[in-house]
Amino acid sequence: MSQGFVVLAQNTEKVDYVRCAEALAMSIKRVMPSANISIVTDDACYSNVWDEIIPLPYGDLAPKSDWKLINDWQVYEASPYDYTIKLEADLFIPRSIDFWWNTLKQRDVVVSTTIRNFKQEVSDCRVYRGFIDDNKLPDCYNAITYFKKSIAAARFFEIVRDVFENWVEYRSILKCNPEEKATTDWVYAIACHIIGVENTTMPTFTEMSMVHMKQYVSGIPVEDWTDSLDR
């Protein structure tokens, strides 16, 4: 049975996410040389770091200038692997996480629920999680999501699609700003709630985590961490 990492990367007017994804893939290959890594994109991609370059199965459903999050649900069908770890493009993997597979393969879907500051300490910062707390939703971080090809995982991504495509209706019954945008974290949290947090998260597996470089998570003086920590 195949396993691998998949990165969905679409460029916007401001960010070249394909280049970010290439840097991520190279970081994975550096610490896990035999890892399978594929990219899902509709943008030009010429790097030889990828095992497969996969087009979006249903094409780009987002406006040209828009943040492309609405396409996220397509990653399930696009993944060529039986077991997939989906990573956001703007991540970097500094050490092997190959041991994750043994734990994750026991489940259909696992969305990360743990973040750390730059000192590697688990963070309980709530500054950026008002939507989650106000609506009593699972504290999910979609940047690292595992799934296997299964009925349960397919259902999860069907719900993700439904929430994105009908966000105005969902938003109208949630506690939030009337103009709240559908971020992937918010949408995944709703999907986890609908399917059941016990079926979609693994809070005790804190190794499945990332360093989140937000200002208040890492206790730095400005939101752009590169102004404080890159020297």
Image: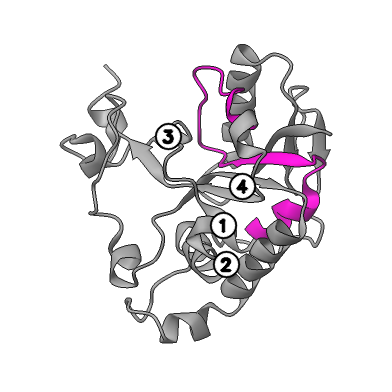
Which of the marked residues, 3 or 2, is nearer the chain's N terminus?
2
Mark 3: which secondary structure?
strand
Circle 2 or circle 4, nearest the eye: 2
Using the rendered view, name the quadrant where residue 135 is placed.
bottom left
Circle 3 or circle 1, nearest the eye: 1
Which mark is on residue 199?
A: 1
In the picture, the quarter occupied by the C terminus is top left
Residue 140 x, y percent position in the rendering: 44, 53
Q: Are marks 2 and 1 in contact (CB under 8 Å)?
A: yes
Question: Label 2 belongs to which residue?
Answer: 195
Mark 1: which secondary structure?
helix
Q: Nearer the viewer, residue 2 or 48?
A: 2
Q: What's drawn in magenta, residue-wise?
A: 72-101
Q: Please tell me which residue is depicted at 80% across the width and 62% down the height of the picture.
A: 58
How many angstroms separate mark 4 from mark 3 (CA)?
Answer: 23 Å
Q: Are marks 4 and 3 in contact (CB under 8 Å)?
A: no
Which mark is on residue 11?
A: 4
Which of the marked residues, 2 or 4, is nearer the chain's N terminus?
4
Which of the marked residues, 4 or 1, is nearer the chain's N terminus?
4
Residue 166 x, y percent position in the rendering: 58, 80
Look at the picture and state if 75 lies above or below 179: above
